[in-house]
Image: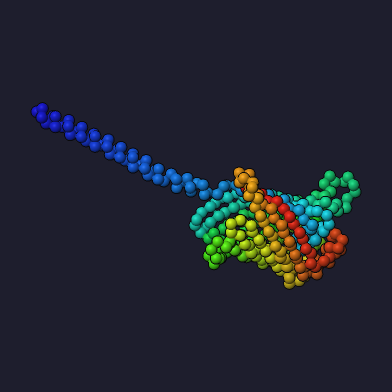
Amino acid sequence: MNVPLRHDVSTCGRSTVLRRTRIIFAWLAMSLLMSLLTPHLGAAADKEPPFITGLLDLPLSNYYLTPRGVNVENAGVIFQPLLLLNANLYQSDGPLSNITATVGVWNSIHSKNRSGNAPGSTSTPNWNELDFLSGLSVTLLKDWTFSIGYEYWLSPIDAFPPTSILQLKLAYTDSFLKGFMPKNSGELSLNPYINFFIELHNKSAAAATIEESFYVELGMTPKYVFAGYPLSIELPTYITFPGSDFYSQDSTVGVFGTGVKVTAPLTFIRERYGKWSVHADLVYKYLANDGVVFDNLTALPPHAGTRHPVQFVGGLTLTF
């Protein structure tokens, strides 16, 4: 009777050792698997974009010339700072690539005082305009982006009544062109778009007595980024087709605009302080609509009635 008992004890001992051995090997295998996966998980986390990003642009110009052809100011120095904050609401490698919400503020501050008010009647006689910006953009298949933007414009010097507008834009980023470029030659893209500009309340380019209207804008922003040093050249070009009553006189074509923008990064500034760059712009517009030319001549600064205004811009930009 004792032999079977000793046999049972030894069997139980071996099973206990085997069970513990299996646990040890399982733990080692799990540790090895986690050690292999951890670098990849860390890399994925590093690639995940931040939730909040932003842009601060600080440009100086010789003109305040709107995309609609309104020559607001053509003398002195114009400072037009822009601040945008973006919230990355959704990011994926699927068909729905990205959803981003944007809020921002834009100002136009002029060295020339044209407030028309008696001295001392306003504390900000050079603050021509303050715009509040908001928008939502949805990117599909990584290259197609539809955005909707609402803007509310104010004038601290009462140069115009409060105005609200809506913009609907569809843009395409033609990243496929990278495959056609010679090796190490840089990156080229055309970036075409169509934009619908809708006046919701009050006018943006004519007297307030005219009914609100709209225009359609077709454009592209060809861009070339040099290899090695990320200097970029852009050629923003567009043409507008105004609806009835957008200007004081109707026409098929409103404005044709083009220009060149050169941007150079300030690589000596560490990225922990954001990405800084400087840009220089040359902007040309042909004002095809007779109404905007007439209104510029009669209601805006002297010598503002030209059909061929040229604008020079220089600025400092921070992205973060």
The vertical placement of 276 against 63, above or below, is: above
Residue 107 in sight here? yes
Tally of numbered tags: 0
Tell me: 298 left or right of 55. right
- Kindly give the residue lying farthest to the bottom in the view shown: 252
Residue that appears at 17% across and 32% down: 10
Quadrant housing residue 242? bottom right
The vertical placement of 47 against 302, above or below, is: above
Image quadrant containing the N terminus: top left
Coordinates of residue 194 in the picture (x, y in percent)? 64, 65
Quadrant housing residue 21? top left
Tell me: 284 left or right of 84. right
Residue that appears at 57% across and 54% down: 99
Residue that appears at 66% across and 52% down: 277
The vertical placement of 300 against 9, above or below, is: below
Coordinates of residue 6 in the picture (x, y in percent)? 14, 29
